[in-house]
Structure formats: C-alpha cells, structure tokens
Amino acid sequence: MDFSDITLNSKELFDRYIKQQDPQVSEMTFTNFFAWRYYYKFRYKVIAGLLCIIAAPAKIEPFAMMPVGDINDDNFAEAYRELKSYFTEKGWRFCFRKLTRDDLKYLGRYVSSEERIVYDRDNSDYLYNTEDLINLRGKRYDGKRNHINRFKRQYQFEYVPLECSLLDECSRIMEEWCREKDCNCQEGDYCERNANLELLRNFRTLGCKGALIKVDGTYQAFTVGELLNDDTAVIHIEKANSTIDGLFTLINQQFVQHEWSSTTYINREQDLGLEGMRKAKLSYHPVRLVEKFTVYPDM
C-alpha cells in the first residue's frame, strides 16, 4: 500500500476532502499538515473514498488520523482494515490520535476496553466565543481590558494586515521570539519554529490571513489564522515581543476584530501540557475544550 508525501500540490485534494467533514480539531487543515509534514512525517492515501493520513514521527509512536471525507460505517470499515494491515506490515502498534468524541462512535466496535481510549487533555483545543475575544466585556475580562488600555497609554500602535511584502518582518519576529525561548530544534524535536517558518514561506499559496502590530513605528508582533469550518476560525501562530506589556493581549483582540468578526467561534489550538500556556489560554475563558482522544484498537 503506497502512501504519498504531502506537497503544495496536495492542497486541492486535502481541501476537497476536509470540506466534506466540517472539521472541529485544529489539526484538520491542509496548512497544519503541510507546515508540520517534516516533523510528523505525514503521508496520505485515498482509501474507500476517504482521505487517510498517517504519521511516523521520530520520537512518537506512529499513528493514523481519523479518515477524512463523507464518512459512513461501510467506508470507514474498509479504510480501517487497510490501515490496520499497513500498520501490521510495518510492525507498528495500531493507533489513532487527534480523535473527537464524535469520531469514537466509528471506532467503538473495534475497542474491547475503555482503557484503550485515552483522553488527551494536553492536545485538546480551546474554543472561544468570537464576541468575547473582541469585546472583552464583564468583570472576568477586567484584566485583559486593563492590559490593552495600559498598552495604548504607553505606545502608539498600528494594525497592519499581512501581505507577502511583510513576511520577512514576521520571520524576524519569529526568530527573535525563538532566541528568547532558546528553541534550538534538533532532528526529531517538536519544532514550532520550523513549522511556523514553513507556513510563512508559503503564506500566499496556503491561503491564510495574517496581521502585524507596529509599535512606535516598528513591527513587534504578528499572527496567522484561517477558517477551520463555516463558523470557526483557527489561530495557527501568534508571536510578539514579550517585553512589551499587553502586546499579546492586543494582537489577539485586534486580529479577531478585524478578520474574524463574522465567525461564531475561535479555536486557539492546544496548550501541549505547558503550565504557562494553559494558564494563559484559560484566562480568556473558553466556552469549551474540543476534546481529543487517542485510541488503541484491538489487534
């Protein structure tokens, strides 16, 4: 069974299948698969009319994503059999990751014990009401409004939609952020820097939206996102000069207000189990987590 590598030429096929499924998890965009293809070693094949994606990263056990497309019990069963056969042939433990609770109904018949279904809190997505992130109303957002007001008293700023001529500024901000965080990526490491730079290099083709914030005449923050489904936008990147108090809060609010006000929800991806990131994402009061599960079917 031959699986193909993901290239820019794969975008039309991925977009066609993803649109059939009303995706909920942040990973389910071509942008994500393309930007992270080297780390996860994503490959794909159409089986039984479903787009099947597997990953074989260096430091995580191989896994399959939920087959994508107009799914039903019959075509899922056929895709499942072929995926299982492939994993067996490779000598890999059969595993699905990034599944939603709705996805579990298709896998239930292949799992004999609840212990084989593992809730993945660290990779569950934070979902917010768009209006909450724009207006920051009420006592629970007092701190966020204060951050923005304090920023506006101290600095002059300009919101600038991202165009290709400004991609070098985004790369510079990304590199400066990475030097501060000491994200020296080694082979096989989870490397946000490499994935983000890959997205920026192909920004026009991937079809995302982005923005920068200019502070006192210098670009100091940028962000990139896209529509995940008809009523939800997903934010892929948000980087800022952390020495400028309130800048992260400002670009979060401004990007949603300018680009995504027509949506109902904003998906701000996962916290990866990092304490600081979890605290920051909870501070915006998500309406819920998009829960994700790892499943080990019976072999």
Image: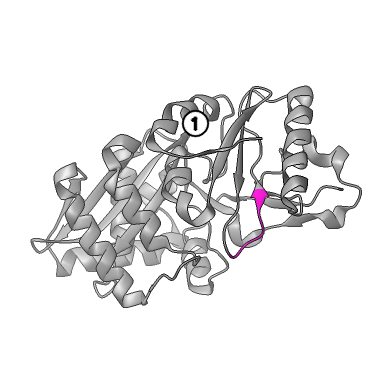
Residue 44 drawn at (x, y percent) = 57, 37
Name the residue carrying label 1.
14
Residue 207 seen by the camera: no
> Crowding at label 1, few (<14), some or many (≥20) Cα neighbours within 10 Å?
many
159 with respect to 100 (left or right): left
Residue at 69% across, 23% down: 48
Residue 85 drawn at (x, y percent) = 77, 40
Tag 1: residue type? Phe
17 with respect to 253 (left or right): right
Magenta stretch? 59-63
Q: Nearer the viewer, residue 149 or 273?
A: 273
Residue at 24% across, 63% down: 173
Q: Nearer the viewer, residue 119 or 253?
A: 119
Farthest-out residue, left: 217
Q: Does the magenta portion include 258?
A: no
Residue at 46% across, 46% down: 32
Q: Does the magenta portion include 61?
A: yes
Reply above or below: 63 against 264: below
Q: Exactly how many numbered labels are in the figure? A: 1
Reply above or below: 151 against 49: below
Residue at 78% across, 26% down: 73
Residue 217 drawn at (x, y percent) = 8, 61
**Would you identify the image quadrant in which residue 165 lies?**
top left
Residue 32 seen by the camera: yes
Reply above or below: 151 against 37: below
Q: Secondary structure at mark 1?
A: helix
